[in-house]
Each structure stands twice: as C-alpha cells, then as structure tokens.
Amino acid sequence: MPSVAHIFCHPIKGVGRFALDAVRLFEGRTIRADRVWAVTHEATKFDTAAPAWASCNNFIRGAKAPELQAISITQYVSGSDMVLKHPDHPPFRFNPENEAEHAGFISWLAQFVPENRAQPKALVAAPGRGMTDSRFPSISILNLASLAELSAKAGRPMAPERFRGNFWLDGLDAWEEFNWVGKTLRIGEAHVVIRERIGRCAATNADPLTGLADVDTLGVLESGWNHTDFGVYAEVIKPGMVDIDDGAHIL
C-alpha cells in the first residue's frame, strides 16, 4: 500500500525547508506554517497596504537565485526564532513575526541573490493563507517512483528537497499521481482532492545540498516525457493528522 515517506514545510516561500514527522491538515488550508511568508523584490507589484496572494514572479525564488535552494531550517516553532543554514555561510537566527528583525534577515538573504537580479526588499505575508504557487491554498504531493525515473534519466540522484514539496509518497508506480487529477485521496486521516499537475520552473535545476545548478530538470522532463510537470497540487476537504508511514490511497 502506498505510504507517506517524507513531509516538508517551507515557512518562507523560496527560502529554506524543514522536515516533519507528522502534521495536522485543515480544510481549505495549506500545511500550517507552510509559505506563510514570502520575500518581495525591487520590481514586485505586491501591495503592502492591501496584502493578498500574489503570483510567484513577485517574490525572491530559486529560479532566479539558485543558491536559495541550499538553505535549510534547523529550528522553527511558530512564535519563536527561525534558524536558517547554508552550507557556505554562517547561520542566521531571527523571529519572522517580529518586524524589527526583518531588516537583518533581508540583509542576510541578499548575499544569495545575484547582483543582476532584482534584490530582496521585504518579508510579507498574505493573511489567512500561504503564498503557494497555486491560486488556491494547496498542499503538494509527489511520488518517489517518479523521482527515481527522473533521476535515472538525468544520470544522477535527485533529492526530494529539490522540488520543495509537502508530501512524498512511496509504493506507487512512476507518474501514477497524474492519473489522480479530479479524484479524492485519503492521506493519513485527511482527505484531499487532487486539483492539478505542478508545472515546474528553473529552481529545480539546483542541487539542494549545494545551491549549484547541476541538472537541466526542465530539459530532462521535456525530452523524457514531453512535459515539464512534476507532482500534483491538492486541496484539503477533510481535516486530519498525517504521520510518516501513514497510508495513502484513492477513494
């Protein structure tokens, strides 16, 4: 039976991740704390006077700054400090809920953004929902068997963290997840509707251990399967706990 192999949370869109052993899903919401914040840049159209969801091109992200892909989060509990680490730089600690500490974070983050790209400007949030790439509050579900086939085609192992997904499932056929669009998946105690495939961007070219682009991921997908999709977006329709090793199956 397919089961949950990994759970990841990404509190700041495009910046850092940490693993979870379990999480409670809520109807119509992202994973709690997932993509709560995003970092605007000099060319953003995000309206700080009326904050709301905005598309990914308004924010700092790995597609334009691949070194961001190597940032991990070693400590974070909502309401307390977040500790961000990069393999080539000293760690940085701050409380994202304390506006007085935002400037220091933006200054630390700027070292990972190339000079010819729009520079980080401010840490922002969209009240009541996460800054997902989808227009609806989504969770993302990915398949380890699909990753194994993609890695084989690329000629090197590709870590799950490269794709910044929430749930990784084991025990499926490769690309089986694409057949689920429009169907309801039970994952742990929760039920989710699979809404759409995830179209990928150049952020996935970068190795999450180094932040260096080492695979033309989009090119490999295109040459192997005639698309650039990987994983699916889902919407939670029944709340519940999801733990590592919990089962997952289409109802």
Image (spheres, rainbow, N blue to C red):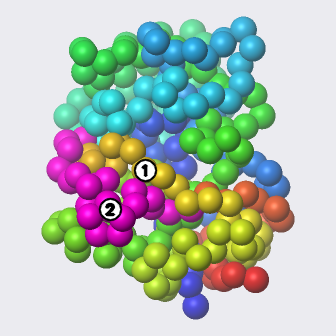
Secondary structure of the residue carrying numbered label 2? helix
Residue 200 image label = 1
The front one of 213 and 85 is 213
Q: Circle 2: is it few (<14), some (14-19), or many (20+) Cα within 10 Å?
A: some
Quadrant of the frame with the C terminus: bottom right
78, 137: nearer the viewer: 137
As drawn, 32 above or below 229: above
> Which residue is rendered at x = 71% and y = 45% of the image?
136
Magenta stretch: give its range.
209-232
Q: Quadrant location of the N terminus?
A: bottom right
Q: Type of residue at label 2?
A: Leu
Dot 1 amino acid type: Arg
Q: Is residue 220 magenta?
A: yes
Q: Which residue is mark 2?
A: 221
Residue 187: percent from left, percent from top: 68, 73
| In-front residue for pair 227/77 | 227
Q: Position of residue 51 (x, y in %)?
A: 71, 19
Image quadrant assignment for residue 120: top left
Residue 158, given in percent of the width and then of the height, sits at: 28, 62
